[in-house]
């Protein structure tokens, strides 16, 4: 069984995946880290030097490879992964997909603190982050909503979120 966590950047996918991996004993794969490792560079450098189209192609290749070659693991996806190609259909076909739904105000607050690690928002002024996130979520929600399960993360600690995932999946 592969459990794929999806959601907008800043929704807590990485943290929740780590805790879920510890609690279940399932191996953890972070899609962005796998892409970085295979390209010997960081995600911001890939975006800067080769562009988003190159990144999305590599993302698709690594996603397909992980879904085809792993049996039992937690897969933390990039925020945009479900919205490109037919990635969401492939994710649902080969894994149990869980959307970590997080309110815009919480996402914006987290992202402002992490801007330099996020190439897509690095140059956006802080006072425009909420609007950017809202627009992006509007575009991505049709993909996110295809997840098998949706967990609203608002006002929940990571342990509670993981507990909800465990109840739904096991």
Image (tube, helix red, strand yellow):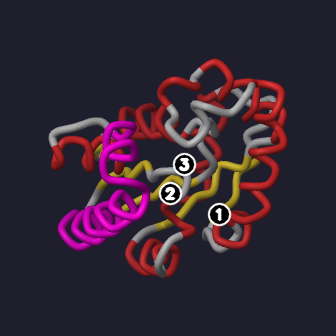
Is there CB contact under 8 Å for labels 1 and 2?
A: no
| Image quadrant where one finds the N terminus | bottom left
Q: Position of residue 40 (x, y in %)?
A: 15, 40
Residue 145's place in the image compared with 76, above or below, is below
Where is residue 75 shown, x and y percent of the image? 38, 53
In the depicted structure, whether residue 88 falls above or below residue 104: below
Kindly identify the residue that appears in the image at 52 percent across and 74 percent down.
Answer: 88
- The answer to whether residue 143 is left or right of residue 33 is right
- Determine crowd level at label 3: few under 14, some 14-19, many 20+ residues with C-alpha closer than 10 A: few
Please name the residue shown 46% across and 58% down the image. 4
Q: Label for residue 170?
A: 2
Label located before the other in sequence (1 or 2): 1
Tell me the residue that label 1 is attached to.
149
Q: Is residue 118 magenta?
A: no
With 115 as the anchor, is 71 left or right in this view? Answer: left
Q: Which residue is mark 3?
A: 166
Q: Nearer the viewer, mark 1 or mark 2?
A: 1
At 71% from the left and 69% from the top, the residue drawn is 145
Q: CA distance from mark 1 to mark 2?
A: 13 Å
Secondary element under disc 1, as helix, strand or loop, is strand
Mark 1 or mark 3, which is nearer the start of the sequence? Answer: 1
Q: Main secondary structure of the magenta part?
A: helix
Q: What is the span of residues highlighted in magenta in the rendered image?
A: 43-70
User: How much space separates mark 2 and mark 3, taking CA atoms?
Assistant: 5 Å
Asked if residue 122 is positioned above or below residue 26 in the image, the reply reads above
Per the model, the C-alpha gap separating discs 3 and 1 is 11 Å
Q: Nearer the viewer, residue 5 or 96?
A: 5
Q: Provide residue 53's location: percent of width, then percent of height.
A: 40, 64
Few, some or many residues within 10 Å of mark 1 (<14, 14–19, 20+): some
Q: Residue 20, image x and y in percent?
A: 45, 39
Q: Are marks 2 and 3 in contact (CB under 8 Å)?
A: yes
């Amino acid at each position: 069984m592969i459990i794929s966590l999806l959601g907008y950047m800043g929704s807590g996918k990485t943290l929740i995946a780590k805790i879920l991996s510890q609690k279940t004993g399932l191996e953890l794969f972070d899609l962005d880290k796998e892409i970085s490792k295979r390209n010997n560079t960081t995600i911001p450098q890939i975006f800067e030097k080769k562009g988003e189209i190159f990144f999305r192609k590599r993302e698709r290749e690594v996603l397909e490879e992980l879904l085809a070659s792993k049996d039992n693991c937690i897969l933390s996806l990039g925020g945009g992964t479900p919205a490109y190609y037919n990635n969401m259909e492939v994710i649902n076909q080969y894994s149990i997909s869980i959307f970590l739904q997080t309110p815009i105000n919480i996402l914006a607050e987290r992202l402002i603190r992490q801007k330099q690690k996020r190439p897509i928002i690095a140059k956006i002024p802080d006072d425009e982050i909420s609007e950017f996130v809202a627009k992006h979520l509007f575009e991505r929600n049709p993909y996110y909503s295809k997840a098998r399960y949706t967990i609203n993360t608002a006002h929940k600690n990571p342990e509670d979120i993981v507990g909800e995932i465990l109840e739904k999946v096991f």
